[in-house]
Image (cartoon, rainbow, N blue to C red):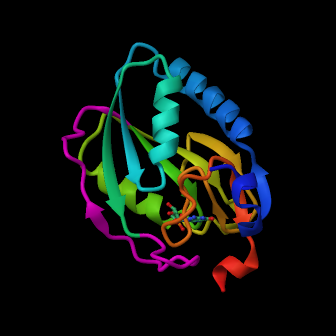
Amino acid sequence: MRASDLEQDFDRVLFTQEQVEARVAEVAAQIDADYEGRDILMVGVLNGAVMTLADLCRSMRSHMTMDWMAVSSYGAGTKSSGVVRILKDLSGDIEGKDVLIVEDIIDTGLTLSYLVQNLRSRGPKSLEIMAMFRKPEALTSPVDVRYVGFDIPNEFVVGYGLDYAGRYRNLTDVATLAPHVYA
Ligand code: 5GP
């Protein structure tokens, strides 16, 4: 779905599908250069990072495997509950592996701080983070993010995996919602 398919639901398009694709390719090239000759275990955070991980790994030339985690975040609202819970753990062991966490968006940083702490205790060889979007103004739990797609203003956005009440993940552009959608 493009933003133009459902124009009345969106206030503003922040990034078009083409801009997202171009940026993902740039980040993929950066990852390839940094991990040259190494196997990467990409850990996607469900459900938001599905599109990012799928596109990122297909743009990469490095060998990679993938695993997924699900953690609680916003539920159906647009504000963080402040509580992080593991809903689905990894299927495999990460000990001694080069792990790259792939996250959709960093808002407060709470989710990632928790994830990093949790995964670090499992003894990976290395642990880095790729986040497709980051809201620098909202960052209250600072996390060391190696790769960022785009820094965005402190607004609630949907598309490219990001939802509102489960919807809009299949929007290929990234947009803010029109006020009537929240009502
Ligand atoms: P944090 O723990 O950094 O505050 O929040 C991270 C999670 O909150 C993200 O993985 C995502 O699920 C959700 N989130 C944060 N900001 C947004 C946003 O602007 N739009 C959507 N759809 N989800 C967001």
Could you tell me residue 83's position as x and y percent? Answer: 41, 77
Could you tell me residue 101's position as x and y percent? Answer: 42, 44
Number of numbered labels in the structure image: 0
Q: Is residue 103 visible?
A: yes
Residue placed furthest toward the right: 12
> What stretch of residues is rendered in magenta?
73-99
Front-most of residues 145 and 46 = 46
Front-most of residues 161 and 181 = 181
Front-most of residues 6 and 86 = 6
- 163 to 53, vertically: above or below: below
Residue under the point 66% across and 86% down? 183
Residue under the point 62% across and 27% down? 25
Q: Is residue 111 magenta?
A: no
Could you tell me residue 57's position as x and y percent? Answer: 46, 29
Residue 66 relative to residue 152: left or right: left
Residue under the point 63% across and 51% down? 133
Q: Is residue 88 magenta?
A: yes
Could you tell me residue 70's position as x and y percent? Answer: 34, 59
Q: Most prominent secondary structure in the magenta stretch?
A: loop
Residue under the point 53% across and 65% down? 167
Quarter of the image for residue 86 reads bottom left
Quarter of the image for residue 3 reads bottom right
Front-most of residues 144 and 10 = 10
- 97 to 4, vertically: above or below: above
- 117 to 129, vertically: above or below: below
Residue 7 relative to residue 99: left or right: right
Residue 110 relative to residue 20: left or right: left
Ligand 1, seen in the image, is in the quarter at bottom right
